[in-house]
Image: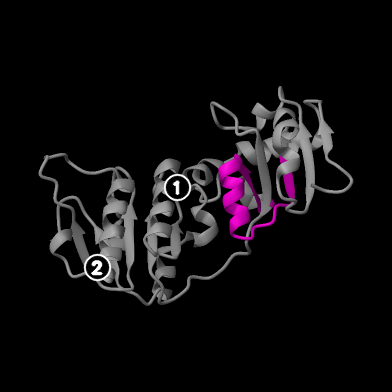
Amino acid sequence: MTATGPQFITSAGNALLKDLRRLAQDSTGYRRQGRAWLEGDHLCRAALARSVVPTLTVFSQSMWEEAGQQWPDPGGRTVVVADALFPSLSGLESPGRMGFVIALPAAAPVRPGVPSVILDRLQDAGNVGAILRCAAAFGFSQVLALKGTAALWSPKVLRAGMGAHFGLHLVEGLEASALEALRVPIVATSSHAGEWLHRAVLPWPCAWAFGHEGRGLGEEIASRAGAAVRIVQPGGEESLNVAAAAAICLHASAAAQSR
């Protein structure tokens, strides 16, 4: 860690601690502040592995005493928070005991011609984070979130993404018209219409579109799709969880390229 040593925080009224609470507890606060809160050893190491340099590293006191000085020095400032105060920064039942504050990448345009995932008003942070993990795993390097989708850099989505954020090109707050810049076919998902996925000839590169957990894709996105597919469900359930459906569809695309 830094040669001057960490700053210790022992008061709940500390101004820096209050600032960190606002960042950690407000799901859209990162948009105003231009920075995000990463909690836990795994997520922080995933960021470092992608050369993300934190502006601030935060340890609980017990974590600092046990292992803090064994961590690589990522640069920036280090603070140590009393164990009784650290849970106020956490959204977990068992707080992660450490975290990073990172500067967010500058807003970037839609990249044309790359395998992409479109999120149309998905509400559940766990679903969004899980789909980001699938996108990264199956070679879809860009995720485009339309207005109304859960905030991509919120603490809950970051935790569910398990580090996938740092390997993806993420663009959020988009209008449907922004998809014109994609220049790849859009494939829509449906629970009741379209070609069966296991029989479909899938274009590559393409953009898979996944819609709201209850209402599915909006008409404006569905009308832009060049194809629609559905997943065979012999068990008879009405529909699959959107993150599960995304995993199946994105894997199908990846598998088709490896044949």
For label 2, the crowd category at 10 Å Cα-Cα, with few meaning under 14, some 14 to 19 and many 20 or more, is few
The answer to whether residue 125 is magenta is: no
The answer to whether residue 55 is magenta is: yes
Q: Name the residue under label 1.
A: 129
Kind of residue sitting beneath label 2: Ala
Q: Which colour scheme is used?
A: one colour
Residue contact between numbered discs 2 and 1, judged by CB atoms under 8 Å: no
Kind of residue sitting beneath label 1: Gly
Residue 15, position as x, y percentages in the image: 81, 35
Residue beneath the point at 70% across and 45% down: 71
Residue beneath the point at 40% across and 77% down: 113
Residue beneath the point at 16% across and 39% down: 237
Residue 34, position as x, y percentages in the image: 67, 54
Q: Mark 2 points at which residue?
A: 256
- Find numbered disc 2 in the image and state the secondary structure of the residue it sits on: helix
Residue 155 position (above or below residue 197) = above
